Image (spheres, rainbow, N blue to C red):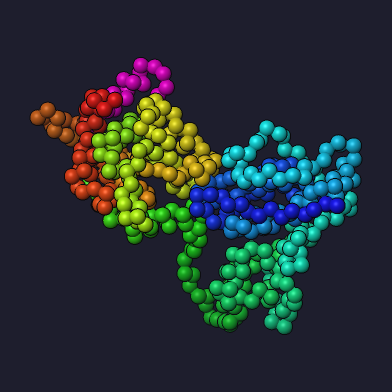
Amino acid sequence: MAQVMEFKLPDLGEGLTEAEIVRWLVAVGDVVAVDQPVVEVETAKAMVEVPCPYGGVVTARFGEEGTELPVGAPLITVAVGAGAADAVAVAGAGEGTEPEASGSGNVLVGYGTDHSRPARRRRVRPGSAAPAPAPAAASRPVAAAPVAAAAPAPVAVAAPAALVTGPVPVISPLVRKLARDHGIDLRALRGSGPEGLILRADVEAALKAPAAAAAPAAAAPVAAAGERIPLKGLRGAVADKLSRSRREIPDATCWVDADATELMAARAAMNAAGGPKVSVLALLARICTAALARYPELNSTVDLAANEIVRLPAVHLGFAAQTERGLVVPVVRDAQGRSAESLTAEFARMTELARTGKLAPSDLTGGTFTLNNYGVFGVDGSTPIINHPEAAMLGVGRIVPKPWVHQGELAVRQVVQLSLTFDHRVCDGGAAGGFLRYVADCVESPAVLLRSL
């Protein structure tokens, strides 16, 4: 007899507590193999595919695409064992494929899961076998209903006299919370999801309905209060981190203009010599790692619980990358041991992953110092906000021709503004100024950097 296993949204690591369903990769009735990705979700940090640790027949899916689920919420139920195999045999006799009935224990694609086996997918034909109910059917009957069921009903608010009796058809705890926070009685709603499932859109429609019903004969509509954009996902994660940085870190900023003419000439000479091209960002990163070797207090973090400053042995260099999803900060591990050529290649690789939403959560955490090149936006200066829990960030403006006194005469030179924001708890202005001055010296005369190599 088949056993129905409930697979819940796993712990995604890095402190993530929720994820949004972007795309289902399986349907009710499909046969899934152990470790086969079943859903693509977007967290506040990355887009990831979630593999199922069970092999068998999918009997139910929980949550529509676009639904936000907390960690621990049900994702799918899978029938495993002999009964599941019989169901597959009825649907595709002679194909010689049976679902695997064991679980792997793996959680996310790219975190120890073996993808050497090809994913196998079979659909149970209608009428061949009824999906087995989920174990929690007694307490949550609607949650165990397959997604591919009846056609969705239109969004509507039921009359007060037509309250739903019995269990309320809601899966998502977020939908329940939204209704509770706004005083919406879920029993008075008619869900638009499969089998009458109440979705977030239904609750939001109910929030608008009372205002419209309260004043049907109003002479003029109430003026709109402006567009409301949910502060969640990546935007919400950025907001939380920046707010925490401002709350906890007593930051200060110093800046200096530097003549980057010699640096640009050195880069041109490197690239003219053949081989892979070297980027300006990589040269600046190499300068930063040399500067951090001289001023290690800026490659540190503050342990509030222990009331200690922790100086870190390796430079895990974050760099700001703008994507369609928003600003992300990929991290290059052990940047202090990389050449400018290696840094160029790694920046390019991680930037492409960021733009396609394929960075893993581990690629976006663990940084010890951040380099922010906002010059690509055509601006000269800024006061960077430290990427908590780091201790400093170097901001780089655009490199443009400007009047400059060079060797006692006025000349047109390639000038850049460098801004350093630092945690005043880890060092004073002397160390911060020394760091920034060393960076500027290397920009103005790259030969200075040779002493540190």
Rendering coords of residue 236 (x, y %):
47, 57
Q: Which of the 4 quarters of the picture holds residue 101?
A: top right
Rendering coords of residue 409 (x, y %):
11, 29
Q: Is residue 274 magenta?
A: yes
Can the viewer see residue 2 in this picture?
yes
Q: Which residues are magenta?
A: 257-278
The single residue placed furthest to the top in the displayed view is: 273
Q: Which of the 4 quarters of the picture holds residue 76?
A: bottom right
Q: Is residue 435 left or right of residue 285?
A: left
In front of the other: 201 or 182: 182
Quick one: quadrant of the C terminus? top left
Q: Is residue 217 left or right of residue 386?
A: right
Q: Which of the 4 quarters of the picture holds residue 370?
A: top left
Can the viewer see residue 321 in this picture?
no
Q: Is residue 292 left or right of residue 274?
A: left
- Residue at 81% x, 56% y is 132
- Residue at 39% x, 25% y is 341
- Residue at 18% x, 44% y is 430
User: Is 123 situated above or below 213?
Assistant: above
Rendering coords of residue 89 (x, y %):
88, 43
